Image (cartoon, grey):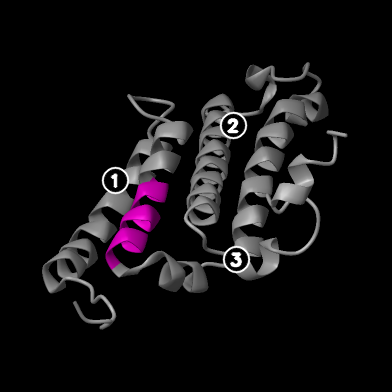
Amino acid sequence: MTDEPTRESVVVTKAVRLVAPFVFTFGLFVTFHGASSVGGGFQGGVVVASVVVTIAFAFGVDQTARWLDRAVLTTCGTLGVVAFAAVGVGPLAFGGTPFELTAYPGAKGPLYAVEVVEVGIGVTVAATVVVLFVEISGGFGGDAAAGPGNGDASDTEEGSG
């Protein structure tokens, strides 16, 4: 057995390059059509995140983690929650109560509000799944190794004594 580095399979990498854009588009479709058909933000977010996970399996987690920016993913996850909260308290500006989506003006105001919520949920779920996958598989290692909560034995032994 040699110590030669493992190489990606040409078939796998070509297949991922071919399929990934279609799966990503399907994830967006599921997210945007959650208010009017089967699907929604959670399902669409998981499908979008599955594209990144598939890319990581094909090209390597380390290479994929270098391509991703943890700060951007964290910001995306936060913005999804902020969008949900904004839609929830938005009706107050139009004389309604929180989450009274019919208070939004226009015939399609409530539909657009639901779409914003679906997209917010989708972005949050996709970002969270990607960050969790990369963290569990050992990516983003440089910035997570320092400080409390890095998962070493000293963190779990503090309370025993």
> Percent position (x, y) of residue 65?
49, 67
Instruction: Give residue 147's position: percent from left, percent from top.
Output: 80, 59
Q: Amino acid at mark 2?
A: Ala
Q: Is residue 52 above or below residue 90?
A: below
Label 2 to label 1, Cα distance in Å? 22 Å
How many marks the image carries: the answer is 3
Q: Secondary structure at mark 1?
A: helix
Percent position (x, y) of residue 123? 53, 46
- The magenta stretch is 48-58
Q: What distance separates the C-alpha of mark 2 from that of mark 3?
A: 38 Å
Q: Which residue carries the number 2 mark?
A: 113
Residue 141: mark in rendering: 3
The amino acid on which the numbered mark 1 sits, given as a three-letter code, is Phe
- Say whether residue 56 is magenta: yes
Horizontally, is 133 left or right of 97 in the view? left
* Residue under label 1: 26
Instruction: Give the numbered dot on residue 76.
Output: none
Image quadrant holding the N terminus, namely: bottom left
Q: Say which quarter of the image contains residue 94.
A: top right
Which tag is nearer the camera, tag 2 or tag 1? 1
